[in-house]
Image: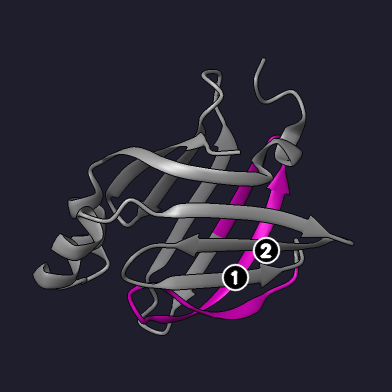
Amino acid sequence: MANSKGVEALKGTWDQVNDENMDAFLKELDVGMAKRMAIKNIKPRLVISENGGKWTIRSESTLRTKTVEFQPDVEFEETTMDGREVKAIVRIKGNKMEHTMKGKDGKECVVVRYVNDQGQQQIDLTCGSATAHRWFKRAD
């Protein structure tokens, strides 16, 4: 099974290959049409690493590069790619990394990352009634 190494399997460089239902997810977050169109046309590269229990997820694209550093189970302040300020916490649950963000507006989003049985990093995003998915292939 591709995910037998647990969250360690997420480490490395990943290129987005597909997504599903991102527009509805972004609408649920009140992201305007212009930003939604820009986001839909960008295929980011993710670089995930861990050093001494501190994880780093860097999302690189032609529009913007964003780095999130965290320790599992420790709440932190984060500014999302669309500019929202949120309180966030990342928990490791078996072979999955669950990133929960709560905005000042009370909206909560959950982003779950794992390596699926096809060896791709799958990201399941949920906010309110909207669910979206993204898939990434290993680049390294």
When the figure is inspected, residue 76 is found, relative to residue 91, above or below; the finding is below
Quadrant holding the C terminus: top right
At label 1, which amino acid type do we have?
Val
Q: Which region of the structure is painted magenta?
A: 74-99
Give the crowd class for mark 2: few <14, some 14-19, many >=20 residues within 10 Å. some
Q: Residue furthest top?
A: 1
Q: Nearer the viewer, residue 67 or 139?
A: 139
Does any portion of residue 124 appear in the rendered image? yes
- Prevalent SS, magenta region: strand
The quarter of the picture where residue 6 lies is: top right
Indicate how the structure is coloured in the image.
Answer: one colour
* In-image side of 111 versus 75 (left or right): left
> Residue 49's spot in the image, x, y percent?
71, 55
Which sits earlier in the primary sequence, circle 2 or circle 1? 2
- Disc 1 marks which residue? 68
Does any portion of residue 94 appear in the rendered image? no
> Residue 62's spot in the image, x, y percent?
33, 66
